[in-house]
């Protein structure tokens, strides 16, 4: 059975940065890359808000570079996905999808989160061509254009407000007759002349020859006054929530009601000695590559301290 000093689960900015820091601190680390090497960022195109790239950087290039940097410092990469964990006492046991088990003195959970999608075939068809689940990442491409945001929570209101600062017009497509967001966010949306809220409306498809040119909408679906219509838009943003990839850790670590791993304020400490959480799996609020990278660095620094204290 393989025994490692630091097992890093996840290969987004948090995972790779953790590996770079761990290796430079002489902590032998193994990264389990999981199903989506490079993480969520690889679903976008150009990253324009990661510091150090004045002209932006291709998301896949950025992640490949982070990976290479970790490898250059000696991190080992395994392509497997962690499917089960036993974190009651060290060495911690992590079972992988090839049936093997890794023993680890420390674990950094950096498994990320996934944006929820409606499940429409058109979302797949137009992904990267007008469909996005990250306004901060992709909003810039819609300057002076018309976009729709689906959702009625805080994220949707925040994304709509952000997009309104760039786009010519923002439709907020809300399935209920009210917003679920906090009052302050609702007020912000209602007071913004560029945002129009379409209550009791469901998006059921998208159309366009060269990327998204519009959405098929249904007002009061299933009611006597149901109305189907097409709304011309250039961009379609999903903001119906994220799902943190925390299922396999739930027997051991504390999570909030939405499944995000709870850590000690301002640190990546999970409460289990030597087990840390970094990146989006523990961050319902910021969900930015640079924030995830920074939290990966913090986790590796904590790993180093933990191992040093154990040895002394
Ligand atoms: P929420 O779960 O709060 O809201 C999701 C929204 O998406 C709801 O309006 C929901 O509708 C809608 N929705 C879900 N599924 C579908 C679907 N299939 N079709 C159409 N609409 C759908 O998620 P958020 O990401 O907005 O927020 C998550 C948490 O993070 C919350 O606790 C929020 O308060 C917090 N947050 C706080 C922020 C802040 O304080 N600045 C910023 C962002 C998030 P319905 O209401 O009908 O269920």
Image (tube, rainbow, N blue to C red):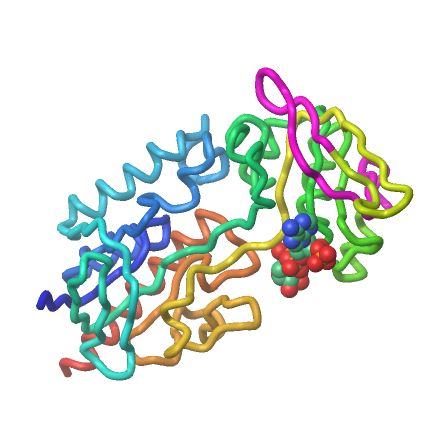
Which residue is outermost to the left? 1
Q: Examine the structure image and report whether residue 201 is included in the region drawn in magenta.
A: yes
Q: In which quarter of the image is residue 183?
A: bottom right
Place of residue 196 in the rendered image (x, y in percent of width and height, measured from the top left): 83, 39
Which residue is outermost to the top? 209
Horizontal placement of 121 versus 147: left or right? left
Place of residue 97 in the rendered image (x, y in percent of width and height, measured from the top left): 24, 58
Q: Residue at x 74, y 24 (%)?
A: 232
Q: Examine the structure image and report whether residue 99 is included in the region drawn in magenta.
A: no
Horizontal placement of 206 versus 186: left or right? left
Q: Residue at x 77, y 27 (%)?
A: 230
Q: Residue at x 73, y 37 (%)?
A: 164
Place of residue 306 in the rendered image (x, y in percent of width and height, measured from the top left): 25, 76
Res 200 visible? yes
Q: Quadrant of ligand 1?
A: bottom right
Q: Quadrant of residue 298?
A: bottom left
Q: Give the range drawn in magenta.
A: 191-216
39 or 230, which lies in front? Answer: 230
Q: In which quarter of the image is residue 216?
A: top right
């Amino acid at each position: 059975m393989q025994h490692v000093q630091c097992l890093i689960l996840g290969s987004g900015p948090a995972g790779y940065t953790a590996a770079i820091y761990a290796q430079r601190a002489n902590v032998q680390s193994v990264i389990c890359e999981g199903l989506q090497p490079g993480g969520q960022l690889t679903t976008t195109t150009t990253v324009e808000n990661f510091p150090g790239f004045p002209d932006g950087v291709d998301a896949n290039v950025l992640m490949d570079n982070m990976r290479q940097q970790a490898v250059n410092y000696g991190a080992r990469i395994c392509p497997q996905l962690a499917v089960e964990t036993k974190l009651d006492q060290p060495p911690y046991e992590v079972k992988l999808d090839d049936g093997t088990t890794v023993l680890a003195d420390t674990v950094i959970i950096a498994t990320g989160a996934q944006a929820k999608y409606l499940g429409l075939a058109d979302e797949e068809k137009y992904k990267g061509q007008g469909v996005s689940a990250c306004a901060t990442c992709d909003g810039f491409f819609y300057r002076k254009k018309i976009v729709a945001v689906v959702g009625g929570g805080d994220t949707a209101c925040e994304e709509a407000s952000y997009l309104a600062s760039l786009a010519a017009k923002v439709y907020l497509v809300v399935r209920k007759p009210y917003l679920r967001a906090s009052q302050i966010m609702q007020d912000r949306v209602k007071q913004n002349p560029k945002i129009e809220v379409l209550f009791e409306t469901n998006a059921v498809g998208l159309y366009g020859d060269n990327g998204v040119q519009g959405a098929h909408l249904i007002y009061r679906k299933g009611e006597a006054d149901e109305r189907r219509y097409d709304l011309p838009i250039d961009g379609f943003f999903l903001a119906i929530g994220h799902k943190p990839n925390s299922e396999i850790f739930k027997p051991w670590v504390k999570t909030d009601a939405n499944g995000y791993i709870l850590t000690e304020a301002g640190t990546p400490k999970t409460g289990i000695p030597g087990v840390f959480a970094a990146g989006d799996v523990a961050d319902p609020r910021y969900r930015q590559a640079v924030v995830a990278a920074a939290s990966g660095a913090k986790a590796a620094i904590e790993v180093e301290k933990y191992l040093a204290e154990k040895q002394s």
